Image (cartoon, helix red, strand yellow):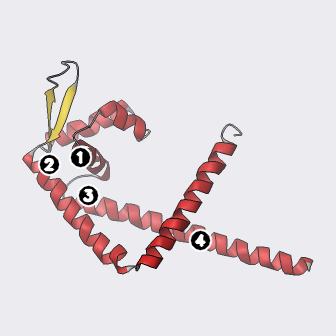
Amino acid sequence: MGNYLQMERTTQLALVLDAIASLQRLTELFHRRRVELARAVGITEQQWSVLEEISTEHFMPSLFAKARESTAAAVSKILRQLLDKGLVRVSISSNDGRQREYGLTASGRSTMSRLRRARQRAIDAVWMQLDEVELRRFVGTGSVIANSIEAYAAITAGRT
């Protein structure tokens, strides 16, 4: 009985390691594809993230930096790059003269439109090929793993 349990655990561990390798591959491919999509329209992935946030019309550089665990200086640098490319405009807030308001220029809106179309083509080619059962299984499994990682991180926080 003991040998059977040991063999079962060895098989499970091998499957877990295969799952981790698959997740790593998927993560790397996903990141590489985002970089390629951004590069195709002449920006970086980081610039894409800032443009996407500015397009929501609720962009605040300090909150963006905090949410991305970045520095205000790093976000400011990206904003300067986007301003230099003519993709973003900045003005003083009419409500509070101490605040700046950011918005997309016509060129910025065009860039975001091109990015969204390219992203949608990728979604159609990859994700829309999966049936509903496969998608629900992926979402469910991904959520279980993400929740487990977050719970484990919370438990182990401060033990380092």
Which amino acid does the dot numbered 4 rest on? Ala
* Image coords of residue 152 (percent x, y): 66, 50
Check the picture and name the quadrant holding the N terminus: bottom right
Pointers 2 and 1 in contact (C-beta within 8 Å):
yes
Q: Nearer the viewer, residue 56 or 21?
A: 56
Q: Which mark is residue 19?
A: 4
**Mark 2 = which residue?**
108
Which amino acid does the dot numbered 1 rest on? Leu
* Image coords of residue 15 (percent x, y): 66, 75
**Which numbered disc, 1 or 3, marks the residue closer to the eye?**
1
**Mark 1 = which residue?**
51
Q: Residue at x 46, y 68 (%)?
A: 26
Which callout, 1 or 4, points at the residue further toward the start of the chain?
4
Mark 1, Cα crowd under 10 Å, few <14 / some 14-19 / many 20+, is many
Q: Which mark is residue 38?
A: 3
Pointers 4 and 3 in contact (C-beta within 8 Å):
no
* Image coords of residue 32 (percent x, y): 37, 63
* Image coords of residue 40 (percent x, y): 21, 62
Which amino acid does the dot numbered 3 rest on? Ala
Image quadrant where residue 123 sits: bottom left
Q: Is residue 70 visible?
A: no
Q: Is residue 30 left or right of residue 11?
A: left
Real-space CA distance between mark 2 and mark 1, rounded to the nearest whole angstrom:
8 Å
Real-space CA distance between mark 4 and mark 3, rounded to the nearest whole angstrom:
29 Å
